[in-house]
Image (cartoon, rainbow, N blue to C red):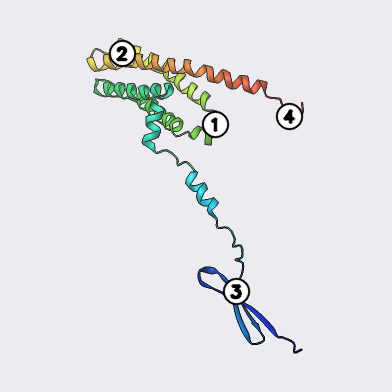
Amino acid sequence: PRSLKRQQRAEAGPRGTALLVTLTAGRLSVSAAAPSLAPAQPAASMSESAARTETPGFLDSFQSYVKTRKGKILLLEIVFCIIVLICYAASYDPGYLTLAICEMVFAIIIFVIYMRQFDKDIAFIHWPWTDFIRVAVGSVLFLITSLIVIIRHRDGAGIAGGVFGILTGILFAYDAYTIIPSLRRRHTQAATEPSDGV
C-alpha cells in the first residue's frame, strides 16, 4: 500500500477560533481546534481602582470634622480670635494684635492638619503635646493681656477686646483640659509596650 502523506497546519479563523487544516492523500479537511487559553486580562487592577475609596474633598472633610468636639472647639477659637482681632484693631491702642493674629494662625493650621488627617502622615511630631502647649500658652497670654487691656483702656473697642480675650483664654483652657486624657492614654500605652530585649 502506498504511504499516505499527511500535512497539518493551524490557521487563525474568525473571532480567534483556531482552524486545523489537514492534507491527507490529496484530500483537504478543515476542523476546528480546541481554543487555547488566552492569558487573563488585568481586570484585577481595574476592579481594585474602582473599589478603592477616593479621598474626601475639602468641603466634605470640613463638614464631617466640624461635627466633632475638637472641630467645634477649634472653630470657636478661630472665630473668637477674629473677634478679638477686630476689637483690638478698632481700639486706640492696637498693640495686642500680634497675640490674636498668631493664635488664629496656629488654630487654623491645627484645624487643617486634624481635618485632613495629616497628623497620621507626619508621625515624627507629637501632635497632642504640640496642641496642648499651643492652647496652654495661648490661654495664659490671653488672660494676662485681656486683664491689662481692661484695666488700662477706656474706649469701648478695647474693653470689648479685653472681654472677648478673657472668653478666648477660658476657651483655650477648656481645650487644654480636653487634650489631657489623650496625653494620659498615650503615656499609658507607651508604658505597657514591652521594650526590646525583654
CA gap, disc 3 and disc 1: 72 Å
The residue sitting at 49% across, 43% down in the picture is 52
Q: Mark 3 or mark 2: which comes first in sequence? A: 3
Q: Where is residue 18 in the image (x, y as percent from the top left)?
A: 58, 71
The single residue placed furthest to the bottom in the displayed view is 2
The residue sitting at 39% across, 39% down in the picture is 57
Q: Mark 1 or mark 4: which comes first in sequence? A: 1
Labels 1, 2: front one: 1
Report the front residue among 33 and 45: 33
Give the crowd class for mark 1: few <14, some 14-19, many >=20 residues within 10 Å: few
Residue type highlighted by circle 2: Val
Q: Position of residue 59 (x, y in %)?
A: 36, 35
Residue type highlighted by circle 4: Asp
Instruction: Tell me, yes or no, if residue 105 can be seen here.
Output: no
> Do tag 1 and tag 2 residues touch (Cβ < 8 Å)?
no
Disc marking residue 31: 3
Residue type highlighted by circle 1: Ile
Labels 3, 4: front one: 3
Query: Would you name the residue on which mark 4 appears?
Result: 196
Query: Would you name the residue on which mark 2 appears?
Result: 163
The residue sitting at 47% across, 47% down in the picture is 50
Q: Mark 3 or mark 1: which comes first in sequence? A: 3
Give the crowd class for mark 3: few <14, some 14-19, many >=20 residues within 10 Å: few
Query: Would you name the residue on which mark 1 appears?
Result: 125
Name the image quarter holding residue 41.
bottom right
CA gap, disc 1 and disc 2: 34 Å
Q: Mark 3 or mark 4: which comes first in sequence? A: 3
Report the front residue among 84 and 171: 171
Q: Where is residue 189 in the image (x, y as percent from the top left)?
A: 62, 22
Name the image quarter holding residue 159.
top left
> Do tag 4 and tag 2 residues touch (Cβ < 8 Å)?
no
